[in-house]
Image (cartoon, rainbow, N blue to C red):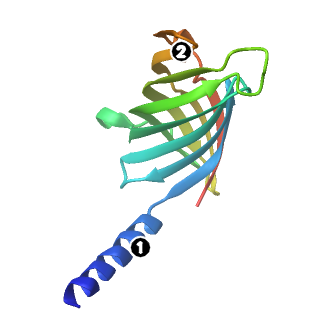
Amino acid sequence: MKKLLLVAIMAVAGVAAAVAQPRAIGANIGYGFDISYQHALGEANMIDVSLNLPLFSGIGATATYDWINPFGTAIPWNYAGQWNWYLGVGAGAGAYHLFNRWITTSWYVGAVGHVGVEYCFDFPLQLSLDWRPNIGVEGWGSYVGFNPYGLYSGISLGVRYLF
C-alpha cells in the first residue's frame, strides 16, 4: 500500500511539474506546413515536437531538444517583448507523395538540426524564423540514398500561442 501511495504521489508531482512549465502551440509554413508544440524545460531548454506535411503531399514528424540562447549569448535588444535564439538536435521521419497515385511513395529518416530566432510579445504570441535540416536517408522502391531535400526543407516562419 505504501508503494502504491508513493507511486501515486510521484505521478501527481510529475504531471504538476509538466503542466507548470511554459508551453507554446502553433504552426510553421515553409517547405510545407507544420503543427508545432514546444515545452520549456527550465529557463534555457525546450523540447519541440512537430507534425509535418512536407511538400503538402506527405506526412512526417520531428522532435528536437533545443538550447535557448546557448553559450550565454542572449539577443541584447529586449524592449517590450523578448528576443531569443535557439539551437538544437533531434530526429525526424516521414513519407512523401502519399496522396499522388502516379508517383511512387518515398520515405525519409534522419537526424534533425534546429536553428531559429523568435520574438515573444508581451501578450501570449510568439513569431519565429526556423531552419530545421533533416540529414539522413531516403528511399523508394528498392532505392536507398542520401536525402538531398532535407538540407533546405526546414526553412519556415512560425506563429505560436504561448500558454
Choose top left, top right, bottom left or bottom right for residue 56: top right
Residue at left offset 57%, top offset 24%? 154
- Give percent across and percent down for residue 149: 57, 13
Q: Which residue position holds label 1?
A: 16
Q: Earlier in the sequence, mark 2 or mark 1?
A: 1
User: Which residue occupies the foreground of this view, 125 or 109?
Assistant: 109
**Residue 96 higher or lower than 59, as above or below:** above
User: In the rendered view of the protein, which quadrant contains the N terminus?
Assistant: bottom left
Mark sitting on residue 30 = none
Lateral position of residue 71 relative to residue 124, left or right: left
Dot 2 falls on a residue whose secondary structure is strand
Disc 2 designates what residue? 139
Neighbour tally class for label 2: few under 14, some 14-19, many 20 plus, Cα within 10 Å: some
Callout 1 amino acid = Ala
Question: In the image, residue 50 lies at what x, y percent?
Answer: 56, 41
Residue sitting at x 55%, y 45%: 79
Instruction: Please identify the residue farthest to the left as the structure is shown.
Output: 2
| Residue 103 percent location from the top left of the image | 73, 14
- Cα–Cα span, label 2 and label 1: 42 Å
Callout 1 environment at 10 Å: few (<14), some (14 to 19), or many (20+)? Answer: few
Which mark's residue is nearer the viewer, 2 or 1?
A: 2
Question: In what quadrant of the picture does the C terminus appear?
Answer: bottom right
Task: Decide which of 93, 25 is in the foreground and name it.
Answer: 93
Residue farthest to the front, as pictured: 142
Please give the name of the residue rendered at 79% of the width and 15% of the height, measured from the top-left corner.
102
